Image (tube, rainbow, N blue to C red):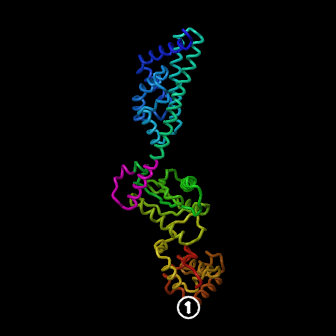
Amino acid sequence: MDLDHQVAEVISHITSAAYAQLSERAGEIVERLVSEIEYFAADQPILDQLNAGATHNFSITMAILRRDVDIEQVGPSEPAIEIARLIAQRDIPITALEHAYRLYQESVVRWCLQELAVRSQNAAVTARAALEISTFVSAHVNLIAQQLLSTYESERDAWRLRRTASRSARISDVLAGRTVDVAPTEEILGYRFDQYHLGVILWTETTGNTEDELAHFEAAAMMFRDGLGLAGRPLFEARDAHMARAWIPLGDDNALDEGKLTALQGSWTGPVIVSVGNARNGIDGFARTHDEANSARLVVQASESSNFGVIRASELGAVTLLCSDMSAIRAWVSDILGPLAADNSATAQLRDTLRVFFRTGGSYAAAAEALHMHKNSVVYRIRKIEDQLGRPVREQRLDLENALQIAFWLGTAVLGDA
């Protein structure tokens, strides 16, 4: 009998032994996969599919070794395809799938070589059969693994789109005040509503690679949270290539440290701009703090200024309500401020003096201290302002204060050549 026939015969004996022990051999392979890949042991659906497909996979490998089946005609089994999908849906790294097939290959080859050692005394036959076993098993595993990696990638992309759409839909329902089933919604979002929340909007005026931009927003949200000294994971949602929103969990007792937030405002650098709502509690607070942050964003964008880093809704007051009709608000500011609505540095200095004067209770001394000026300089500026207005500053004080706040936050968007 020539060498080829002897090799074919010994491989036939090995595969026959395998068919006689299919369940036992397949069970051993599953046990190894579960013991060495942590993701599999903790996931019952994956374990179920491993058990369902192991015997089939092992028998196909043996059929290939017997030359009963052409490798190129063999595709992944349904359980194998389902495992690839499950791994993708759970965001388990693709390396786990690659690891599984390397372990399968090693287990099959090792068992075949052990059988070969007791069935062949001829060194040439043993060497040739060992090479053929290793080559065919490796080729089979490589082909199947390649097809399953493609399945994994397609399912991962599709699943992320479905999950993102589902998350966005749930968030939109909550923000719109629609009735939601809280527990399933919290599970989908991975976020608890029964606590205090800090809503933030993150955006940038720059353009760049979309993937990098979105990752930059999420990193900025985490940096913002860290700056507040908090540990809970924010709920993050990208809105488009230039904007994202997030909710930072503050726990049951409102863990927001105002001092740290103020410090963060002073240290924050671009290019991501952050608008911040007020700390709010419960599912209604979840929506309200977001609305506040979004209103603050609209003020910043309406101001046409790039000097903002972190802007708090609590600083803006009623200004956040006035950005829906910029032409009307511009005309109103001009009516109230008159010459003080001029867009130049000298007039800006006067507006700032009057704004601080009002903020310090109409006290010349207190305003001078806040402005680091002599009291007489404040008196001089207030008289100059009154001359330009044609009336005392204490007349229409409320309108003046509101107009000054609007001019301070919106700047050139509401100022002109008054």
State yes or no: residue 142 in magenta.
no
Foreground residue among 145 and 202: 145
Q: Quadrant of the C terminus?
A: bottom right
Q: Residue at x 49, y 54 (%)?
A: 236
Q: Residue at x 49, y 82 (%)?
A: 399
Tell me the kind of residue under disc 1.
Answer: Gly
Q: Is residue 77 above or below residue 326?
A: above
Dot 1 crowding, Cα within 10 Å, few <14, some 14–19, many 20+: few
Foreground residue among 85 and 70: 70
Task: Residue 95 in the image: state x and y as whole percent.
Answer: 53, 36
Task: Residue 87 in the image: state x and y as whole percent.
Answer: 46, 38
Foreground residue among 32 and 252: 32
Q: Quadrant of residue 127?
A: top right
State yes or no: residue 174 in magenta.
yes
Q: Quadrant of residue 392?
A: bottom right
Q: Is residue 16 above or below residue 386?
A: above
Return the residue at label 1: 390
Secondary structure at numbered mark 1: loop
Q: Which residues are magenta?
A: 160-185
Task: Residue 33 in the image: state x and y as whole percent.
Answer: 48, 28
Q: Residue at x 38, y 51 (%)?
A: 185
Task: Residue 376 in the image: state x and y as whole percent.
Answer: 65, 84
Left/right of residue 317 with respect to residue 357 in the rendered view:
left
Q: In this view, which residue lies farthest toward the front?
A: 2
Q: Quadrant of the N terminus?
A: top right
The count of marks equals 1
Q: What secondary structure do most residues of the magenta stretch adopt?
A: helix
